[in-house]
Image (cartoon, rainbow, N blue to C red):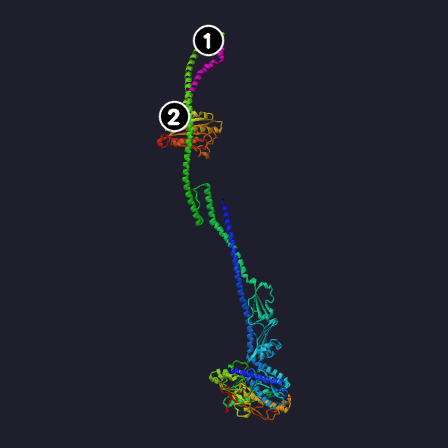
Amino acid sequence: MTSKHLQKLRGFFRLTAGLLVVLSVLGGQPAAAGRAVLIGLDADMSSGSAESGMAIQRGIELAIDEINAGGGVLGRPLSLVVRDHHGNPSRGIDNIIALAGRPELVAVVGGLHTPVALAELKTIHEQRIIYLGPWAAGTTVVANGYAPNFVFRVSVRDEFAGGYLVNQILKRGFERPALLLENTGWGRSNEKAIKSALALHGLAPATVQWFNWGAKQVSDQLQVIDYSRADVILLVANAPEGEVVMKDIAALQMDKRRPVISHWGITGGHFFRDTRQALEKTDLTFLQTFSFLATASVPRSATVARAYIARYDDCDTVEQIKSPVGTAHAYDLVHILALAIKAARSIDRDRVRAALEQVKHYPGLVRDYAPPFTARRHDALTGDDFHLARFNGNGIIVKIGAR
Amino acid sequence: MKKETAHTRLYLSLFLRVTPLAVAMFLVIGYIVVTRTTESALVRVRVNHTSQQRHAELILKRKLDTLKDSVKLLAANDLVINALIDVENRSHYLPIFFRSLRIPGPGRANISLVDYKGWPIISNQNATTSYAAESFWEAVSRGREYFTLTAERLLFAAPVVYHGAAEGAVIVEYPSVQYPLIFNIGVGTDAFVITGKNGNKLFSHPPKIKLSRDSFFWQKTTLEGYGAVSIETGMIKEYALGPVKSLENFLLIAICLNILALLASLSMTAHIVTRPIVNLTIAIQKITNSGELNRRVEEAGPRELSEISKVFNRLISQLQKTMISRGELQAKIQERTREIEQMHGQMVMQEKMASVGQLAAGIAHELNNPINFVRTNFATLTENFTDLEAVFKDYRRFAEGYEARYDSPAELTAVRAKESTLQIDYILDDIPALFQESERGFERIARIIQSMRDFSHVDYTGDLSYFNINNGIEDTLVIARNVYKYHSDIQTDLGDLPDIQCLPEQLNQVFLNLIVNSAQAIEAQQKRAKGVIAIRTWREGKHVCCEIADNGPGIPKEILSRIYEPFFTTKAPGKGTGLGLSISYDIIVRKHGGELSVDCPRDGGTVFTLRIPMDLQTAGGKDENRA
């Protein structure tokens, strides 16, 4: 049996396990625990960034496990309802509507895709449903103009990422970054952030190139980038398109292969698996916020990692935890949500939403949240929580500079 | 056989024999050609139709495939995929993109991009349609393509697939009003029908097929890859089989022309073959009918016929030769027959003559004694009368003297009266004349008896002797006198002739024959005036010639050649034997080596001329009778 088959088999067991949880909750047992409080997951569970959805789900599940093990919230267990949006905003919106229709559901954890999140904002606020962002980084996902704002995020904010990435390229001595962005709200979010960050240094992108979702090649864009005499490429892409980009770069002559500093979208899918050979020829570093490997010595991280390895058959070592940021962010978000529910003593979404702004402290995986959110600040992370990473030869995300 | 009718008849018989056969042959060939051609044309038509059908099918399939491919291409377009994700910003580029969209080919398609539930996102038309409620959407949302062709619309939906899932779909739809534009494919078929599920007609070209379905060959196939769609092409039978029809017409014309050509060639054949055949036949007939073996047929016409003519001519030549020798043979036979007959006649005649001669000789002998006795007595009587007259005259003178001197006695007077009454003077005067005449009569009787004795010459028959033919003529004239004396005068001009060695009695017979013939011919004229028989003799070299001419009616030309034939006669039965001239010819020509010729001058009459050699031996004449 190949590793692929094993993975599939594990995925199947995972789904079965998840379903059993959901069913047990819906089935109204255990009776003493009362009806479960539902947390929705609206993410890409099957498409190009399915790994991110899985990572998020696992983070939620690990957190729920812990919380339920501690008696749940308000005497009720937490339970997860998963809905797959494929990265497709239309599905996302429908998922939000569907999830919002369930009275026991208190919040929806979102997925990797900024465009989906952005498209869902209107519905989220119409339905007054708490949206917890563990990944999608678009600045305006949180800075959405809605009041009250139902969106809370433990993840990168592009605005910050832009500044961070610019700082990193400057630190590495690059001065003429080319922007290669996906043609979505996320791409535009980063364009804005990076341009602003560069402007702070009196710089501007050598060129800004766009590619569409589903693009099969970006050689034209790379050519323009080459002509622009850019010295580095700032890439904003998810795994499928990121793969195309890296393969096309690898296909260039060696002297034309620019180093790539990427946003983290590429880590949401089977990126490494499909680009292993291309990566050997290219210099790719990318943004990360958390690494189980890097925090292995931290007891909280180690505990979760152990729980992770124990719970999921496809993972035997810390290194094998995929898209760790998704898991970590989701894990932290669910714990924060639990705190908020407890504080609100209700699963009323408005009250929990308000309570989220009132959670004073939570020592999470990614950081100590003190407080995680405020009424004005719904982004829990800052640029200080970012680091660059790269894939090692086995596809394990390795924090740069970590021991 | 008349030439023209023969020709026509032969031609007709040729025509009647050849034409039905040829026409039947042509018809059979025509029938075979037409049926074979029709069959092969039908096969060709079927093959052609199949290829047309295939062609139409291919075109339609390609059209639909192109449509599908275009839509699929559009569905796979990364801008379209991106637009499904880039909800907030797609309005900046999607409308421009979609407005420019067109499906290749005629017709205007409604191209829509719908989301994963079939709700419209954008369309190239102003109005957008939701396909969410469509029954097919379920399949499309699960990533399946969907094609439908109904009486209302042609629709193809291609899911926009991202990472294995349909995140939306591109749907292209043609309303049925567009069908004439999109399906009116120039496939070169006479009729073209597209049917959908249950065989209901979706589109037909021409829209209303005017002719009945039976007027077409139809072929129907299901469009590969478009299960429910069938395409049917019709080929108008009349057009498809047009070439066969024109071939039939052509064949008909060809058969007519062939028959004409046949007639022409028959005419030519008749001209080339039948005419010579007819000519040959006519010539042969002529020769057969006339027996003119010296005639020859014309050796003309085609080689074979001229060969026939040649062979025939040779045959005729051979026949002629045979006929000539046969003629000779016949002539000999005839000659022999004639000889035999002549001999027979001669023998009869000789027998007769011998009898006559013996009789005549007997009569002459018997008469000779009494005649001599009477004649001698008569001479004595004459002398006695002279004596008596002298006495009587003395008595008279005495009487007269007595009377003059005496008165006549009454007795004297009575004697005188008696003398006067009895014309004794006249008697006395007449008696010497009577005696003289009687003397001449006696002479003549003597001569007749002599002639009879001469003529009969019974003892000398068949013996040669020297003889003057003038004597023979004179004798004959005496004997035949009784025959000619009432109707003819004899003119003789007998020249000075030598005696010739001959068979006198036979020559006499010739003269008798010829004179009797002439006399009878003259008599037969029944003229008042007497005819003339002129007999002339002369010497001519070593020949003596005799010509016996009469001014009778002459001999008709027709029988001129036959007059010497034995038993040929124009006389009434019993009147002539028909042997006269035959025997004469035999005597003159054969027995004396002479010539006997006959001439009939224009002014009438008949002239027989005999030419007899004076010396029979030197003349070389045959002398079989010489003992």
Magenta range is: B413-442
Chain that bears disc 1: B
Asked if B600 appears above or below A291 in the picture, the reply is above
Which of the labelled discs sits on residue B459, or is there none? 2
Mark 1 or mark 2, earlier in chain: 1
Q: The disc labelled 2 sits on which kind of residue?
A: Asp
Q: Which residue is mark 1?
A: B399
Q: Quadrant of the C terminus of chain B?
A: top left
Closer to us: A83 or A227? A83
Chain that bears disc 2: B
* Residue A156 appears in the picture as rendered: no
Q: Secondary structure at mark 2?
A: helix
Q: Say if the magenta span includes residue A46.
A: no
In space, the residues marked 1 and 2 are separated at their CA atoms by: 62 Å
- Residue B25: image location, x then y, percent: 51, 55
Which of the labelled discs sits on residue B27, or is there none? none
* Residue B35 appears in the picture as rendered: yes
- Residue B250: image location, x then y, percent: 53, 58
Nearest to viewer (mark 1 / mark 2)? 2
Closer to us: B285 or A129? A129
Q: Secondary structure at mark 1?
A: helix
Callout 1–callout 2 Cβ contact below 8 Å? no
Q: Say if the magenta span includes residue B433.
A: yes
